[in-house]
Amino acid sequence: MRRRTLLAGALAATPLAAGCSTGGEASGTAEAGGRTTLTYGMWDVAQAPGMQQIIKAFERENPDVSVEIQLTPWNTYWTTLRTSMRGGTAPDVFWMNAVNIQLYAANGVLEPLGEHIERDRTPVGKHPKALVDIYAYDGEQYGLPKDFDTIGLWYNKELFDKAGVKYPDSSWTWDDLRDAARELTNPKARVYGITAEMDRQSKFYPTVFGAGGYVLRDGRSGFADERSIEGLRFWTDLVDRGWSPPQSAMAEVRSRNLYLSEQTAMNYDLSAMASFMYGTPAIKDHGGVTVLPKGRERATVIHGLANVISAKSRKKKAAWKFVDFMARRPAAEIQAKGGVTISSYEDTQDAWLKSMPEFDLRNFIDMLDYAVPYPSSRNTAVWEDLEYLLLGAPFSGKGNIEDAARTLAKQMDRALDEEDK
């Protein structure tokens, strides 16, 4: 099958197959006779101290290997990565996300990990299955999780108290959230009940799944499904009623910022944002978080980052040692103590929970029982861009969500069909 993708175009000048880049002998020669230095690509400066501690622990166990972090800001990370792959200078090991994993794996620029995992008995089963599955493609594992995030409902206790509204808890339904949003909205104080932002990670997926709908299934779009439309309509109704700011009003201001500045009483957001909440005095003092409300089903979206190895690395033996180390308990415990993100290794989250005792962070872990993997395909970014293009008007109170969703489904299916050509 001919695969025509964005990544293939970007790397057209370079052989992509692992066999064309390094062989076992070449890899052994590059690593022989001295200390091997690996490069490690990542984008989050907040996680750099924790990653550096993990690296020190790894180097103590592997004195013949050193690791250098290559920190690239998120807004240029993927462009820089594609350029470095084209030039043969990609990091040996680097961060990967759900949006891009299939794109990179399908083009042969990632090292398959299955044989390594089986040989060294890497404890993949200690990580959430839904998360591990994200980083598998065509029957092969290409990434090993390092952390995970789920989506919860953050709320401002002070604004709830002023409005005389009971705090949300696990008994809430989406109808309860809608009613609370109405009561919490205060135009005079310029406070909204909640924000319906089309964020690339949290956005509206949890509500679609909670309504029993779906985004992507068996290579086809689910946006025309009536239950999916019901989930989307929930948010656009909030915008139409004035209980949420329209998407157009958030062109330069994220919903997270509105929540941090106490302009919205509720905000659905990632567990990974807990440290930002904790760093804002007003939210640390009277912010709270609980599980997402229940619809026809309970649902949240699970995502998390994975470590992958470049298929063009000349240091694959050392690179695998590092990736394997990061997938085990000692590295997970170091990461958890950093308090920035939730380690995905089973039963290592206590340090993260204790790092911000003011918040009931265990809610994010409890939601693992019904977490749905972040939907992705080989060219996820293509149809996600269509979401913004076609749903933007209804989310700004200027269009019909039913028609927009059905149009999106047709165009998304065409984009998915192109992936197989």
Image (cartoon, rainbow, N blue to C red):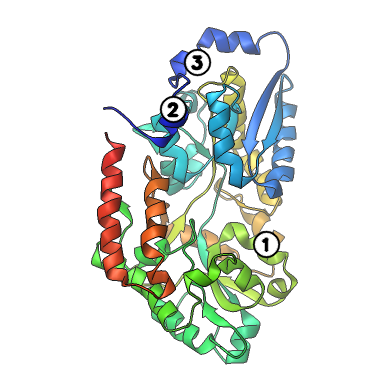
Q: Are marks 1 and 2 in contact (CB under 8 Å)?
A: no
**Crowding near the residue tagged with mark 1, few <14, some 14–19, many ≥20 C-alpha atoms within 10 Å:** few
User: Which one is in front in this view, the residue at disc 3 or the one at disc 2?
Assistant: 3
Where does residue 284 sit, x and y in percent of width and height? 71, 71
Where does residue 277 sit, x and y in percent of width and height? 66, 66
- In the rendered structure, the answer to whether residue 174 lies left or right of residue 271 reads left
Q: CA distance from mark 1 to mark 2?
A: 36 Å
Where does residue 306 sit, x and y in percent of width and height? 53, 40
Q: Residue at x 43, y 20 (%)?
A: 17
Chain-order first, disc 3 or disc 2:
3
**Crowding near the residue tagged with mark 3, few <14, some 14–19, many ≥20 C-alpha atoms within 10 Å:** some
The disc labelled 1 sits on which kind of residue? Phe
Residue at the disc numbered 2: 114
Does residue 38 appear anywhere in the picture?
yes
Residue at the disc numbered 1: 276
The disc labelled 2 sits on which kind of residue? Gly
Residue at the disc numbered 3: 21
Where does residue 204 sit, x and y in percent of width and height? 42, 64
